[in-house]
């Protein structure tokens, strides 16, 4: 998927005013996700995303941190200046678009490495 198409989907889902706003939110969500998953998983995901969004999965990351959904949302809210409820909306807009790009087994593999309540953020039913 090309950058313009990715950002259009995020913009529509998040009801953002511009592609630039959609890109800013996308970078914040992807960077936060990169801190939660292993560097190898981040590399695999980055390979599926259009530039420059793929770079958000590579910048300043160390080892994967273990934190839950609420902390994920708090970190996105902190980066975007949004309220936690807005951050949940933002995360859903971006990660459901990521789910459009990362198909089948690869998405299942990524979700299997995250707590069950993350699946909903990707627009998927929680395993169960």
Image (cartoon, rainbow, N blue to C red):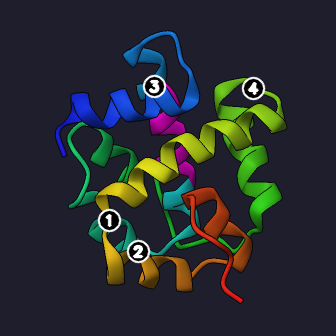
Residue drawn at (42%, 48%) of the image: 97
In the rendered image of this protein, does residue 83 appear above or below residue 84? above
Q: Is mark 2 on a helix, strand or loop?
A: helix
**Residue 102 numbered tag:** 1
Cα distance between the residues tagged 3 and 4: 16 Å
**Residue 107 numbered tag:** 2
Q: What element carries label 4?
A: loop
> Which marked residue is nearer to the observer: mark 3 or mark 4?
3
Instruction: Check whether the beta carbons of the residues at disc 1 and disc 2 lie within 8 A of each other.
Output: yes
Q: Name the residue under label 4.
A: 82
Residue drawn at (26%, 51%) of the image: 49
Mark sitting earlier along the chain (3/1): 3
Q: Where are the magenta residues, as a range?
A: 24-32
Residue 71 percent coordinates (x, y): 79, 56
Crowd band around label 1 with a 10 angstrom C-alpha radius: few (<14), some (14–19), many (20+): some
Cα distance between the residues tagged 3 and 1: 19 Å
Residue furthest to the top in view is 17
């Amino acid at each position: 998927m090309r950058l313009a198409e990715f950002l259009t989907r995020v913009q529509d889902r998040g009801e953002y005013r511009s592609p630039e706003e959609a890109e800013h939110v996308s970078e914040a969500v992807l960077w936060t996700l990169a801190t939660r998953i292993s560097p190898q998983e981040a590399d695999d995901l980055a390979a599926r995303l259009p530039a420059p969004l793929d770079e958000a999965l590579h910048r300043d990351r160390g080892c994967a941190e273990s934190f839950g959904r609420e902390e994920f949302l708090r970190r996105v809210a902190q980066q975007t200046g949004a309220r936690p409820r807005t951050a949940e909306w933002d995360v859903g807009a971006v990660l459901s678009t990521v789910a459009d790009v990362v198909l089948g087994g690869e998405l299942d593999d990524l979700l299997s490495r995250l707590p069950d309540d993350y699946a909903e953020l990707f627009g998927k039913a929680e395993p169960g």
